[in-house]
Image: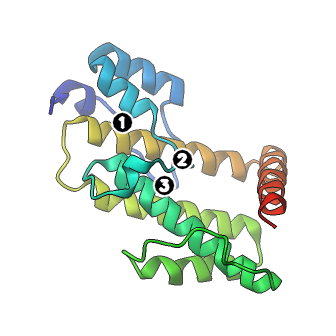
């Protein structure tokens, strides 16, 4: 795997509570200068809301595969908890992988939060902390840059939901998307 010493070394540190120095576009432009096209495509494909593919279901040690499985498990647990609370049949919902039993407890805690803003912050903090584990052992490779990109997305999302007007619009749009998806399941 290629090493990107300069690319990683010049990146400013990101903190969960801090404003990021980079926009997503600026970060990707930075990467485009130093990173191979294949690695740039890999980094660019990182998303807070990944879509599971058949290749993600194995024991692939790459950051994006592990991230996708984690998010899929979190979504599965959350959907089942919400389905039970509404008295809906959860049989057609995807089964969580069961690899990490703590995800079910975390999903229960987050869905029990009555304030959507605090629930979203808890979710973002959970994702941020999970990235700490994914980052272990990666120092100057594309996986490190991918984790940075995901953290940058978390920072920008936290900033977006903290802005009252923008946050309301984003929440409404996402709620409508989820509600529509739930209606299609039922």
Disc 3 packing (10 Å; few <14; some 14–19; many ≥20): some
Residue 21 place in picture, x, y as percent = 48, 33
Task: Confirm whether residue 13 shows in the render.
Answer: no
Tag 3 near tag 1, CB within 8 Å: no
Contact flag, marks 3 and 2 (Cβ < 8 Å): no
Instruction: Determine the image quadrant of residue 76.
Output: bottom right
Q: Dot 2: within a 10 Å radius of its alpha carbon, few (fewer than 14), some, or many (20 or more) residues?
A: few
Q: Residue at x 44, y 62 (%)?
A: 70
Q: Nearer the viewer, residue 96 or 107?
A: 96
Q: Secondary structure at mark 3?
A: loop
* Neighbours of disc 1 within 10 Å: few (<14), some (14-19), many (20+): few
Residue 76 lies, with reference to residue 47, above or below; the image says below
Which residue is identified by label 3? Answer: 16
Q: For the point 50% across and 60% down, which residue is it?
A: 71
- Which secondary structure lies at badge 2? loop
Q: Which residue is mark 2?
A: 51
Mark 1–mark 2 CB contact (< 8 Å)? no
Q: Residue at x 41, y 45 (%)?
A: 14
Could you tell which of marks 3 and 2 lies nearer the N-terminus?
A: 3
Q: Is residue 84 visible?
A: yes
Where is mark 1, residue-wise? 12
The quadrant in which the C terminus is found is bottom right
Image quadrant where one finds the N terminus: top left
């Amino acid at each position: 795997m290629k090493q990107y010493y300069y690319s990683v070394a010049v990146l400013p540190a990101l903190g969960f509570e801090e404003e990021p120095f980079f926009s997503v576009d600026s970060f990707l432009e930075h990467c485009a200068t130093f990173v191979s096209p294949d690695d740039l495509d890999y980094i660019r494909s990182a998303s807070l809301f990944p879509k599971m593919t058949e290749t993600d279901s194995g024991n692939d040690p790459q950051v994006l595969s592990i991230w996708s499985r984690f998010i899929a498990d979190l979504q599965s647990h959350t959907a089942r908890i919400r389905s039970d609370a509404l008295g809906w049949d959860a049989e057609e919902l995807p089964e969580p992988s069961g690899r990490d039993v703590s995800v079910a407890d975390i999903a229960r805690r987050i869905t029990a939060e009555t304030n959507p803003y605090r629930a979203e912050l808890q979710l973002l903090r959970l994702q941020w902390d999970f990235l700490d584990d994914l980052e272990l052992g990666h120092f100057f490779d594309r996986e490190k840059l991918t984790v940075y990109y995901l953290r940058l997305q978390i920072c920008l999302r936290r900033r977006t939901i903290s802005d009252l007007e923008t946050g309301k619009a984003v929440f409404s749009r996402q709620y409508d998307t989820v509600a529509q998806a739930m209606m299609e399941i039922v």
